[in-house]
Amino acid sequence: MKSANRSGSGGLLILLGSLVLISFAGVLGSAQEEQLEDIEWYGFGLKEYAEVSFAIPAEFDDMVQAESLDEGDYSEGKYVVASLLFDDSRVFMLLLYPCGLTGEELDAFALVSALNGFNKAYEQAIYSEDPINISGRQAYVGQLEDQLIMVYQPSDLTVSVIFIDEKINPEALDYFVPSLQITVNEAITPLYPEYCAGIQAAREPPAQPATGVVQLEQPVQPEQAVQPGPVFDIAKMEAEKQQAVDLFEARFGKRLSF
């Protein structure tokens, strides 16, 4: 993997280094023991596919806003994505369902490859070689322009990618990452056999026809003609902020709390 200290935004690299140290030091655990009353817990659903929870200091309670929730197709499978606002900083939580996962734990290369399969633009990201811990699983941290990226497996058949704006309050980040939990509902998946079979068929070269046999061109099914996943455009999302907030509030209520 590419090392995160080769290039990129100085501010984001400082944030990255702080994040790695915090995760290994277990800051959240000691903070919870000493100041439980000063921590606010949040939770919401990624539709019926997973439950997300995290903690931040109570002093930042008013800054967390629900923004949007969506699901869709991409060239390697399906995805679900939610976005939150931490004051003026945006956080995307992406849950990938790639076709072809066998239920084994992925190594760093396979995790990053899963993200690149979502959209090749993320091939430009650079990563730290040292993993951090999210809910007992190894996560790899990188950056793309002004975004911090964390990629890991919340379950053996999914890959989660967290995109965090570099302007996020460092104290909120100190609590958000170590407390983050994505609990996947393994009884439900947006994938179905015909969908993944179509993707596999699209990858395979056409068989050569036997001599004297005319081969008719087969039409591409709509589910095979999916586009790469989106690159999350911060400026565009800012312009659509109010509409997205209204949509998320209509589905889940005004607050992300339980």
Image (cartoon, rainbow, N blue to C red):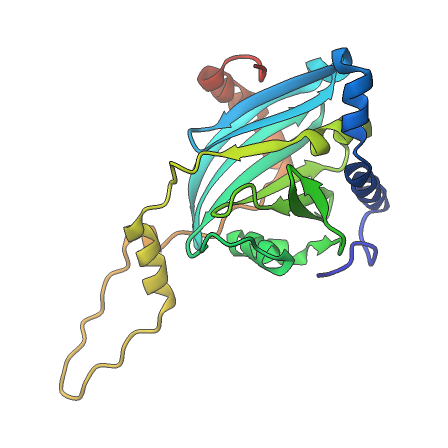
Residue at screen point 69% across, 16% down = 40
Residue at screen point 56% across, 33% down = 182
Tally of numbered tags:
0
Q: Is residue 187 left or right of residue 3?
A: left
User: Visible in this render: residue 169?
Assistant: no
Q: Is residue 194 left or right of residue 128?
A: left
Residue at screen point 77% across, 28% down = 28
Q: Is residue 105 left or right of residue 136?
A: left
Locate residue 253, reporting x and y percent. 50, 13
Question: In this rendering, is residue 60 above or below 226?
Answer: above
Farthest residue toward the bottom? Answer: 211
Nearest the eye: 30 or 53: 30
Locate residue 216, reporting x and y percent. 18, 72
Residue at screen point 71% across, 61% down = 1
Which of the image's four quarters has the C terminus?
top right
Locate residue 152, reporting x and y percent. 61, 46
Question: In this rendering, is residue 36 above or below 137?
Answer: above
Query: Quarter of the image holding residue 198?
Result: bottom left
Locate residue 192, reporting x and y percent. 32, 46
Q: Is residue 50 left or right of residue 152?
A: left
Question: In this rendering, is residue 87 above or below 207?
Answer: above
User: Visible in this render: residue 71?
Assistant: yes
Query: Quarter of the image holding residue 225?
Result: bottom left
Nearest the eye: 237 or 134: 134
Farthest residue toward the front? Answer: 33
